[in-house]
Amino acid sequence: MQFSRFVALGDSQTEGMCDPDPRYEFRGWADRLAEQLAQHNPDLQYANLAVRGKNTRQAREEQLPAALAMAPDLITAPLGMNDVIGRSDMDQVHGDLDDVYSQLAGTGATVVISTFPDVVRTIPLGRRLESKLLALNEMMRDFADRYGFVLVDLYSAPVLTDLRAWAPDRLHASPLGHARFADGAAYALGLPGASADWGKPLPPQPDRSRLLRHTADTRWAVQFLTPWMIRKMRGRSLGDGRPPKRPELTPVRESGQADPGQARTGSGSSSPA
């Protein structure tokens, strides 16, 4: 497939948090996918409207109108994870998603959505989110079937149950995790050279002792979970007042821009959105 106008909607994962980039602060899976697409069409124009912390209602109100105005022929819109970790009513989330996805389907563009990784396997207390996560993933499968969207099944990818695919906050992918997500989207789109092995597990590591795992979980709670809970109680988000990093369609790689493959690959340590 060859696309000419690619627009990404979403939250911190699509913004690219914890995948450092010298130009836009963060790179992320959608930028990485755009770079793969541009190998097949160097004239590809790309906009990324995703902002950390945004829930489905905010994406519908703040990002959807701008995306539709750009008349894209490729749209990525995996939405809803902030609703899962927040206090959103899942019936309301379903209604908002249906509104967003029905409008995207009406554009005639190719639309990519995803299931979401099994956070029960990667974050302490993740089991408390399991029912909402499974409900959201079932919605994503249903919407993909109903509207003919391309679905990337992140939930079934073994690599995304490995902490090496995640940043220290365990809610945002590491550079490796973002790369695997981009590869999964490329494969789902049928891009030449894309591999079906994008979700394969990493080589095993020595199993840590229970004490070391408990110590790491405690450190995570102090460093990341507590600040996130305080922000939520205050009704704040890291995305408040933050504009999208690429609000308009521009060439994926502009003249003089460094090869993104040369960007830093540290995992970062940002707090959850």
Image (cartoon, rainbow, N blue to C red):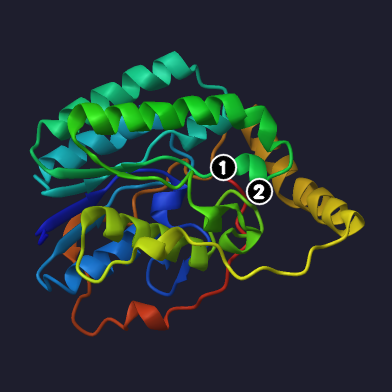
Q: In this view, does 169 lie above or below 206?
A: above
Find disc 1 in the rendering and name its residue. Answer: 118
* Amino acid beneath label 1: Asp
Q: Which structural element holds mark 2?
A: loop
Q: How crowded is mark 2: few (under 14 residues within 10 Å), some or many (20 or more)?
A: some
Residue 79, percent from left and from top: 38, 37
Q: Is residue 119 above or below residue 173?
A: above
Specify the quadrant of the image occupied by residue 207. bottom right
Q: Is residue 138 above or below residue 124?
A: above
* Amino acid beneath label 2: Thr
Q: Which residue is drawn at 77% across and 69% down?
A: 206
For residue 27, say whether it is visible.
no
Residue 114, percent from left and from top: 37, 42
Q: Residue at x 47, y 44 (%)?
A: 239
Which of 271 and 231 lies nearest the eye of the viewer? 271
Find disc 2 in the rendering and name its residue. Answer: 122
Q: How crowded is mark 1: few (under 14 residues within 10 Å), some or many (20 or more)?
A: many
On the rendered image, what quadrant is the N terminus found in? bottom left
Residue 264, percent from left and from top: 49, 78
